[in-house]
Amino acid sequence: MQADNSPPGGQSSTPSSPPADPRLRLVDRTMQLYHHEGHALIETLHAAQESFGYLDEGIMHYIAGRLRVPLSRVFAVATFYHAFTLKPPGKHTCVICLGTACYIGGSRAILDGIRDREGIAAGETTADGEVSLVVARCLGSCGLAPAGVFDGEVAGRLDPQQVLDRIGRWRHDDPA
Amino acid sequence: MSPEFPKKVRSDLNPSRVLTFRIDGRDVSARADESILIVARQNGIAIPTLCHLDGLSERGACRLCIVEIKGSARLQPACVTYPRQDMEVVTTSERVVAYRRKILELLFTERNHVCSVCVSNGHCELQDLAVELGVSHVRYPYLYPGYPVDASHERFCVDHNRCVLCLRCVRVCDEIEGAHTWDVMGRGITSQVIIDLNQPWGTSETCTSCGKCVQVCPTGALTEKGRSVAEISRRRRFLPYLQMMRERRDER
Amino acid sequence: MILHSEDLHRIARDEQDRRDGFRHQVHVCMAAGCLSCGSGEVKQALEAEVARRGLAGRCQVKGVGCLGLCAAGPLVAVDDGATRYQGVQAADAAAIVDALGGSPVERLRCSGDMAFFQRQTRIVTENCGRIDPERIEEYIAAAGYHGLHRALTGMSRQEVIDEVGHSGLRGRGGAGFPAGLKWTAVAKAGDSLKFVICNADEGDPGAFMDRSVLESDPHRVIEGMAIAGYAIGASQGFIYVRAEYPLAVKRVRHALAQAERLGLLGNGIFHTPFTFHIKVRLGAGAFVCGEETALIASIEGRMGRPRPRPPFPAEFGLWEHPTLINNVETFANVAPIIRNGAAWFSAIGTEKSRGTKVFALAGKVVNTGLIEVPMGTTLRDIVFEIGGGIPGGRRFKAVQTGGPSGGCIPSQFLDMPVDYESLAQVGSIMGSGGMIVIDDSACMVDVARFFMEFCMTESCGKCVPCRVGTRQIHDLLARITAGQATPADQATLEDLCDLVRHTSLCGLGQSSPNPVLTTLKYFRDEYHAHIHERRCLAGACSAAGEVV
């Protein structure tokens, strides 16, 4: 296979602008930390997702070349693990926990509420690119069921109305 | 595998040790590093397999080769289970045969295996297994997934509707050809074999077009273009040969 | 810097002196649960209030790990638990400081001051809620790293293994395999390179014990791993922790750096030849990576797909070298065992299940939170005494243990002692310690469907029975809850459960039918009502109700 050691760009639809996207710094540093060993793949994908928000073909191609891991292996790992996403996330992200305690506590009704008003299901982003809905397997906040995360902030004892209000506020705060 | 932590050879299976055990009531002798599947075949006892292929690494994944071992409640796949002295193996109990049949039925429900319109009709290992195990009907609902067909390669074609996820293609490409063009994306019921970054085969930058994957495919998922229904045939004799040559490379 | 034993004692003494300098201690819970209810602001407000009154030298406000009663957060404990406050807001800071040394603020007082706190026995969580997890000195002052010192300077490797073996400690990650046997197997494996892995990929939905321990007392796990490394002859450890636990990851990394700085990790620990390093590896959201061989594949940077065992990781583990894998709670028990002796530990618990177990009590129970009880405590004590019973005047229906590999235990077993054998007998498992209380508003068929959906989406897809079987079982359960199933479907359901259980490749596939099998066994009437009467007894499945 052709090892592609150049930064992403050219034919792919990378969000980075070659040659020296500052967002690649974290990715490069992670790979260096592991001496560009193949087993650093998952850590590197974490770094890439943190920098770019998602994994696109360009960055996967770049990482495959640098770590000397087959392209198909990179894609396989990126799609095997739920932590990685290949689609650009919305401006805001709402995570609803679907762990047992949260399910028993009514998180299904919250998801239904979001579906009915925002028209998105788990893993989807609203058409205007504002809000992404993600479900988590368990946030470990079972004591606060049902729990969710709104742009990184954990909130507990949610009900559908509360969640819809929060999403509504996102829209209100930054008029497009 | 990593230079930091070098790979080690499995030492608990001593190839120079010979032991005796029983398969279906027959006394057999075997080397400690030969699987129950291999020893059974050497003795003319056929155990059904699907993911196994001579010349490729074992996965123990299709579960069709499960056998009973006396004294153990757990069923074991013959392809990755090694004999112990005086072990008693049963390959054709009613229980394992019934399980094999059900596993095969599950495979039939998973994708769209319509033999009458398949290029592999008559040369299909899934079909042969159904005949061998007497699967005449499927008791579980068909899932009818709608998978695409990728005909972008100039010589080959992949139809995911016929794929049984045995991963022979992935293994032959990685272990024998050394290209690792194939892998599996996703997980669980949504798993699917992929080329490079899940791209059309014809655009692959790593595929050498050697065709080994097509030769090892047990069903009509990977085929050569230009064949019509029931026309395909597979050549696989190169595999054990290549494996042997690779193993002996260090001696030359 | 490398410590001598005198240094360890000096650090402990200094810390004690520092602590004694304060007349009052105000502990604010800084674990994930309370943080999400605003305990960070509460701590700031208390600090500001203490400073404003010029009490900074006499009253210490400090962030601590989990205080346990997550349901009532943010929690504040005054003078080492003499008084506990719940639901504290920043505005309450003045009242709390006013009350120091006097009578407590009644309106904030923890109603859970009774059984929830009194009935627990703390080994693993002995420091939770008492020490600042970000200061190694506090851990050392609480006898931390004394076990490691004792092992390295006063015990042979075999003696350490024997001590763990004699204690009767069993793996806390699920199956309950005796830790001593596992350690012995790895110690015996002939290889100069071995590894210790701490499994902190707490994937069971409804379980947060490991998260709490890592957030509240990370050094305890590090010390346990180092002792294990010494015992089995490994010099490299890995902590495989869920990326979904950012706070736990941060605290573990912080703790590792502190331990390295003091030479408690690194080369020549306590001036002995023993060398031990620990690296953190992030999980990436795959339940199956709790399985040992899948976890190893994940650390190696691959998809977490289990491989057939044998060979076991004790012989062929990480990069094919002998590897010891235990979970967080197992390692957290090790230092106290070495410090206090096997006899002390084995006196707690039951004949076959020694010691304590940490449970994450959640679901329809008043006092949700983290608890630690001796093995053999009855379910009734846990749910009704410690847990405070069922809220909202509803009736207890079942308790789910062991996550997707476990089962639903009905009320007739409430007086059953909780230990490995008893749980297995009723068709469930101990699991890692998630305990979800289910009340009569839940439909048990729907609960079974929930777990099967989990198993279906978490199946790695390698073996056919789990990959296709879990999907088929899920679809059948969905049909039952929708009121569209026939009696034949129930027979097919039972048939498929049997198949998946006996022919799947790994433990996760094999145990995935457990929630279905236990609900079929104990709540058969609910299946019957859905199928034969198109009715959901709990009134939870709306579709079933409409079909009549």
Image: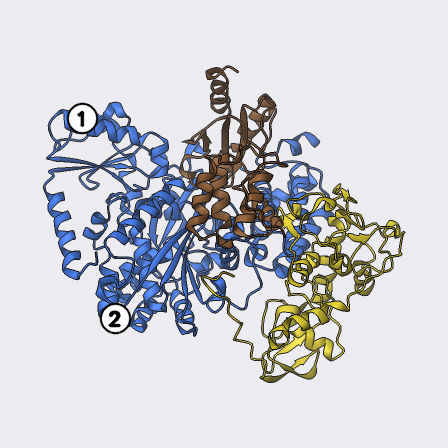
Chain colours: A brown, B yellow, C blue
Q: Is residue A157 left or right of residue A63?
A: left
Residue labelled with disc 1 = C49
**Residue C124 visible (yes or no):** yes
Residue count near mark 1 (Cα–Cα under 10 Å), binned few <14, some 14–19, many ≥20: some
Q: For the point 67% across and 41% down, which residue is it?
A: C480
Q: Earlier in the sequence, mark 2 or mark 1?
A: 1
Name the amino acid, label 1: Glu
Q: For the point 52% across and 75% down, which residue is it?
A: B11
Residue A127 x, y percent position in the rendering: 61, 23
* Closer to us: C69 or C308: C308
Total marks in image: 2
Position of the C terminus of chain C by quadrant? top right
Residue C273 x, y percent position in the rendering: 27, 68
Above or below for B155 versus B178: above
Residue labelled with disc 2 = C155
Position of the N terminus of chain C by quadrant? bottom left
Residue C78 x, y percent position in the rendering: 20, 37
Residue A131 x, y percent position in the rendering: 54, 25
Q: Is residue C534 left or right of residue C227?
A: right
Q: Which mark is residue C476?
A: none
Name the amino acid, label 2: Met
Q: Which chain hosts label 2?
A: C
Q: Secondary structure at mark 2?
A: loop
Q: Which chain hosts label 1?
A: C
